Image: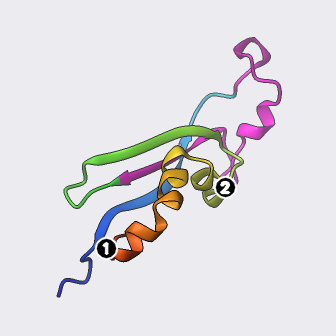
Amino acid sequence: NYALEGCIGALDGLALRIRCPAARDGVADPGNYFCRKGFHALNIQAMVDSKKKFLFCSPCHVGSANDARAWAETSLAHKLDAMEDILTEHNLWIA
């Protein structure tokens, strides 16, 4: 048996530093982009396979969003939630 048998990918979030957005960029509240690490950012959610190939990337959240919220609101999270029974039946999971 392999310790990672059934793992379909590794998921993580990161804060991608950006310049402070401005009203001219169409951003109503630039403060939402300020992350807990002390800079303006986008919260990126990404998943890679065992060969470090990107399977999924979502750059859709402001820096102040925590990873749990940013993940829960991605299209992939919604799809996997809908497939929970199938994933469980086949012992598939995400690290």
Q: Horizontal and vertical percent for residue 64?
A: 72, 47
Q: Which residues are magenta?
A: 21-47
Q: Which mark is residue 69?
A: 2
Residue count near mark 2 (Cα–Cα under 10 Å), binned few <14, some 14–19, many ≥20: few
Tell me which residue sits at (33%, 77%) in the image: 91
Quadrant of the rendered structure where residue 90 is?
bottom left
The reply to whether residue 95 is in sight is no
Quadrant of the rendered structure where residue 36 is?
bottom right
Left or right for 25, reference 95 = right
The reply to whether residue 60 is in sight is yes
Q: Residue furthest bottom?
A: 1
Residue type indicated by callout 1: His
Left or right for 2, reference 79 = left
What kind of element bears circle 2? helix
User: According to the image, label 1 marks what residue?
Assistant: 90
Tell me which residue sits at (36%, 62%) in the image: 10
Q: Is residue 37 magenta?
A: yes
Q: Horizontal and vertical percent for residue 89?
A: 36, 76
